[in-house]
Image: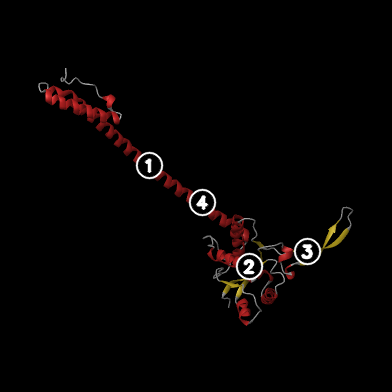
Amino acid sequence: MDTHDICILSVKADEAVARRLGESIRSYRLPSNVKLPEEGLDYRRILYDCEGGPLDDARREALDASRFLVMICTPATRNDPGILARLAYFRRKRRKEDVIAVIAAGEPADSFPESFIEKKPVQHILPDMTVVERIETIEPVAADLRGDTERRRREVLRYETVRITASVLGLHPDDLEQRQRSRRRRAVLSLLALVGVVCLAAAAIFLRLGLIAKREGDVAAEQTRLSLSIAQRTIEELPASFAGDEQALAYIDEAIANARESLDELGLGELLAAPETGGGA
């Protein structure tokens, strides 16, 4: 009985790449409308074989229990004895299609094991209608995780995750990729709708705050006007109330002068008319 969907095989130096791919596959979520060809198929039970060493009984049992072998191919992989022994053993037990090559570094000719590369005669018709036979090298169709930048490596990892998952589930990669793009579009539209709602809510809040501020500003302006009116009336009427008391008028004149200085500092002095105090005349 298969207890692992995928065994990811690599040399020790490529273990980080193997685990990054494995985590990407394990965290991938199938679109809700995908119908599996067989009930119970899965892709998230992943085993790693990245420690190297000879092919022993424990590793044979692990390979026997794995439906697919995903092989990380780099120049270090091409002639590694342990890798080649595991590959040969798995191929004897499974179909050719159950081995998925993933090139992670180097050129294909430098990274694929020799058994991955086929050489076959191909007939070509020359312009003079002569038929010649040539030996051509056919490399396997492989997932490609290479990228010049971290951003590009993330992009190809997402793309190849979908393709590998489709192969493990017996689905057509292009169909699953289209469904994945459709899901991403829906997610983006949902996000844009959410952003729009948040922006509208924020706009409403800011408008409300603006109206409150304006209203408070109007209230403050009215309070200032009333205060100035009271101050004006007091400055005009207070001296008249003490017209017969020269000592009181002296204190009143001093108080009015201090009040005017304070208003001048606030930029409000010009709003007051200069009254006649009735004192010192």
**Amino acid type assigned to the residue bearing label 2 in the image:** Asp
Q: Is residue 251 left or right of residue 73?
A: left
Q: Is residue 189 left or right of residue 153?
A: left
* Numbered-mark total: 4
Q: Residue furthest bottom?
A: 57
Q: Is residue 229 visible?
A: no
Which residue is disc 2 drawn over? 14
Q: Nearer the viewer, mark 3 or mark 2?
A: 2
Marks 1 and 3, how far apart in space?
67 Å
The mark that comes first in sequence, 1 or 3, is 3
**Residue, x 70% and y 73% (percent of image)?**
80
Q: Tell me which colouring the rendered structure shows.
A: secondary structure
Q: Quadrant of the N terminus?
A: bottom right
Which residue is disc 3 drawn over? 137
Q: Secondary structure at mark 4?
A: helix
Q: Secondary structure at mark 1?
A: helix
Q: Nearer the viewer, mark 4 or mark 2?
A: 2
Which residue is disc 4 drawn over? 188
Q: Measured from the top left, where is residue 34 in percent x and y?
A: 55, 61
**Amino acid type assigned to the residue bearing label 4 in the image:** Val
The mark that comes first in sequence, 4 or 3, is 3
Marks 3 and 2, how far apart in space?
26 Å
Q: Secondary structure at mark 3?
A: strand
Q: Secondary structure at mark 2?
A: helix
Q: Measured from the top left, where is residue 228 in percent x and y?
A: 23, 28
Labelled disc at residue 206: 1
